[in-house]
Image (tube, rainbow, N blue to C red):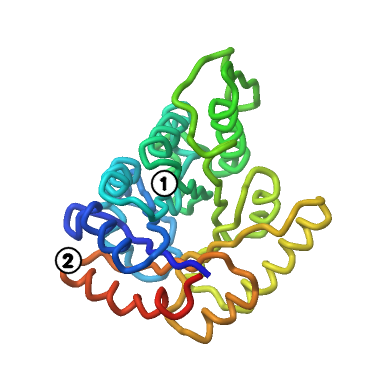
Amino acid sequence: MEFGVATFVTDEGIRPDELAIAVEERGFESLLIPEHSHIPVERATPYPGGGQLPHSYYRSLDPFVALSCAAAVTQRIKIGTGICTIFQRDPIHTAKEVATIDVLSNGRFLFGVGAGWLREEMKQHGTDPSTRLSLMEERIEVMKRFWTEEVAEFHGNHIDISPSYMWPKPLQRPHPPILVGGMGPTVLDRVLKYGDAWLPNMIGQQPATLRTMLVQLQNKAADAARPPIPVTVLGAPTDPAVIESYEALGVERSVFLIPTVSSSETLGILDKLRFFTETYSC
């Protein structure tokens, strides 16, 4: 099993370049950065983690700019979004950003995407929460076409693009892996429809839920004549017994979600988590 780190990178915590260097030096395989474009002050949508929304959610840096900094100072670790709210983003610009980072990092980008949870944030981007899943599907298809075709076009229910050029193309072929995040009732179908891997977020979830859904996912993959789907667990607990159970289930990567704190505090957390990279990593 491989191990990664995920955290909100903000203007108040450790810099993304310093974080990336520390992650690579301690033997981690990957660094994922989530995003929120903004947080409306007045909102009815409850925070899924319960209680008050963490301060870091509305202080977070743009993930693609932060990941560019991370790529520039590292050689080995994979870097990616965990997750990108593509249903709130222009797909053409985002396709170019993903491809650019993949080229500049020498093919180390992981594209984590998800359906989000904050309805008020979606609406202020002009996204209808009730149709965001179909919108996300079309936007990912548009991006795939720009990544893989010299002249790309798309005509869907939400998006209409005439034949167009877009470069660069990603270094990874056919494109960087798309990790579809979520634990909802339709997420496994979305993984099979347009994903390369599943990215379940285990914060607040029971291990048994993951086990059940993972069996369902691999059964669906077999029915579709696909090989087993890789799984990256986001928000993995720091419990060796649970990590060993993930390994037994065939989980490819466990990603620890760490708090947004000062450089010295972050380095201390990473030093403690180094136990896993030294004990269980491939």
Q: Nearer the viewer, mark 2 or mark 1?
A: 2
Q: Residues within 10 Å of mark 2 (few under 14, many from 20)?
A: few
Q: Is residue 63 above or below residue 251?
A: above
Residue at x-position 49% and y-position 73% = 204
- Mark linked to residue 62: none
Compare residues 255 and 260 and report the one nearer the observer: 255
Q: Secondary structure at mark 1?
A: helix
Q: Is residue 80 above or below residue 238?
A: above
Q: Residues within 10 Å of mark 1 (few under 14, many from 20)?
A: many
Q: Quadrant of residue 198?
A: bottom right
Indicate the position of residue 60 as horizontal and vertical percent values: 28, 51
Q: Earlier in the sequence, mark 2 or mark 1?
A: 1
* Disc 2 from disc 1: Cα separation: 30 Å
Q: Secondary structure at mark 2?
A: loop
Residue type, label 2: Ser
Q: Which residue is mark 2?
A: 262
Residue at x-position 45% and y-position 77% = 237
Q: Which residue is mark 1?
A: 120
Q: Is residue 267 above or below residue 145?
A: below
Indicate the position of residue 41 as horizontal and vertical percent values: 29, 51
Indicate the position of residue 91 as horizontal and vertical percent values: 48, 30
Residue at x-position 41% and y-position 46% = 120
Residue furthest to the bottom: 241
Side of 24 where 88 appears, left or right: right
The answer to whether the residues at label 2 and label 1 have Cβ atoms under 8 Å apart is no
Residue type, label 1: Glu
Residue at x-position 67% and y-position 59% = 185
Side of 174 where 50 appears, left or right: left
